[in-house]
Image (spheres, grey):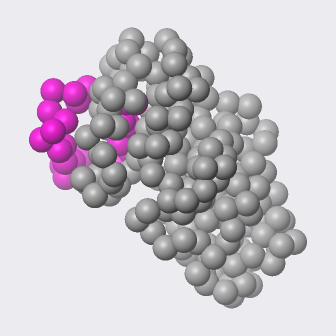
Amino acid sequence: MEIIGIFGGTFNPIHNGHLALAQTVLDTLHCTQIRFIPAAVPPHKATPAVTAQHRAAMVQLAIQDRPQFVLDTCELDRQGTSYTIETLHLLRHRFPSQALCLIMGQDSYQKLPTWRRWLALLDYCHILVVHRADREKTLFLHPEHEGKLIDIATAPEAFAAQANGLISFLPITPPDISSTRIRERLSQNDDTVITEIPPQVFSYIQQNRLYKTVD
């Protein structure tokens, strides 16, 4: 079956690191698409000062030339706190015949027990934990997930063979780009950030005078 990647976040703002990560996952798992889902009200972070509508608009601009990247505003449409389990429940009904793959970083995976109904996530999707290649020796698997881990080399076939229930780890060498640092530099009128975000996103930020104060 087809594999759909689920990439959630505040995207405040979306940057080239996000796009590189999504492309790596797309190529590795042979996904049909990667759905970018901006959080309306993230449960584990302060609500961004930049509105969800602005953040979604920047995502759309960043991915507009990549047909396999899709903006999904389901969490913005739902409003309220953006709990992943509720998003997955919605997506499972929307895509009943596809395998869903939730993409997350190693830090988020380690904090998974703080998420709402975290043990039920695998009832709706697979999980792909993306981690820095130089942290291979520090990988951590929750005991509750034992027996569900598969090697990344077999993940494309295994994920496509069933709709949910498996976990794999993908080592990457990410670019040194941070949304926090980008916001700080934008607040100081540092235009060199254009090397780290798509030019159309930079133009949107300038036109709408976003990040003039650090949130």
Tell me if residue 165 is in the magenta stretch. Answer: no
Q: Nearer the viewer, residue 124 or 59?
A: 124
The residue lying at 44 percent from left, 32 percent from top is 101
Magenta segment boundaries in residue numbering:
125-152
Q: Is residue 198 above or below residue 28?
A: below
Dividing the image into 4 quarters, which one contains the C terminus?
bottom right
Is residue 28 visible in this depiction of the protein? no
x then y, percent, for residue 23: 58, 38
Is residue 85 visible in this depiction of the protein? yes
User: What is the quadrant of residue 10 in the picture?
Assistant: bottom right
The residue lying at 53 percent from left, 35 percent from top is 90
Q: Nearer the viewer, residue 201 or 99?
A: 99
Name the residue at the right extreme: 207
Q: Is residue 95 above or below residue 91?
A: above
- The reply, left or right, for residue 1 in relation to residue 146 is right
Q: Nearer the viewer, residue 183 or 112?
A: 112
Tell me if residue 131 is in the magenta stretch. Answer: yes
x then y, percent, for residue 25: 50, 35
- The reply, left or right, for residue 49 in relation to residue 141 is right
The residue lying at 30 percent from left, 37 percent from top is 120
Q: Is residue 107 above or below residue 154?
A: below
